[in-house]
Image (cartoon, grey):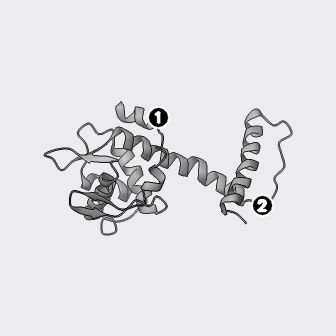
Amino acid sequence: MNALHCMDRCFLAEETLEQLPAPSQVGKTKVGGIDFNKPRMRWVTQAVLALAPSPNGFTATELAHQVQLLSRHSESQYGTRRAAYDLKKLRGKQLIHRIPHTQKYEAIPQGLKAMAALVLLREKVIKPLLAAARNRTRTRRPKNPTVLDQHYESLRIGLRGLFHELGLTA
């Protein structure tokens, strides 16, 4: 229930987006940052979210299997070794932690909220908005627009200006 609550009330701390790509350290080992624009890290994040409700945590092998299901990759393309490295990167960002005296991991509540927010923002907000901003052809407006249609239209117009300022559109 705690895992589901964290996913329901997801948020990103102000500095999270800037800190994710930076390298971090786990013990004496320096590990790479997390690039959420790479499909592999998105699959890993989604796999961790899927495994988070496990009452006794999850192993690197279970994570590898979940990523294989999401990505449709074989074990040779994404195995336990890569999963262990990705888990170490998530540990370096304090998104998950290793359960003491075991080979299992569990998501930290704040990390779970951040991962859920990243997935939600990318898949349900940014991706559809970029797709809509790219569509240059005008569609006919509905004859009887709903309040939701009006909000979407004002959001689309506002984001077009924002994307222009950020240099994301021509």
Q: Quadrant of residue 82?
A: bottom left
Where does residue 46 sit, x and y in percent of width and height? 42, 50
Is residue 51 placed above or below 127 in the rendered structure? above
Camera-side residue of 61 and 23: 23
In screen coordinates, is 44 left or right of 36?
A: left
Q: Residue at x 33, y 45 (%)?
A: 51
Where does residue 162 sit, x and y in percent of width and height? 69, 53
Residue ranking furthest to the bottom: 76
Q: Quadrant of residue 19?
A: bottom left
Q: Residues within 10 Å of mark 1 (few under 14, many from 20)?
A: few
Where does residue 35 sit, x and y in percent of width and height? 44, 61
User: Which quadrant of the rendered structure holds the C terminus?
Assistant: bottom right
Q: Residue at x 46, y 63 (%)?
A: 38
Q: CA distance from mark 1 to mark 2?
A: 34 Å
Residue ranking furthest to the front: 15
In screen coordinates, is 157 left or right of 74?
A: right
Camera-side residue of 148 and 109: 109
In screen coordinates, is 40 left or right of 64?
A: right
Count all numbered tags in the image, as a single digit: 2
| SS class, disc 2 | loop
Q: Amino acid at mark 2?
A: Arg
In screen coordinates, is 134 left or right of 105?
A: right
Q: Residue at x 13, y 46 (%)?
A: 101
Please give the label number shown on residue 56: none
Residue to which mark 1 is pinned: 8
Is residue 50 placed above or below 86 in the rendered structure? above
Please give the label number shown on residue 136: 2
| SS class, disc 1 | helix
Residue ranking furthest to the left: 101
- Can see residue 70? no
Q: Amino acid at mark 1?
A: Asp
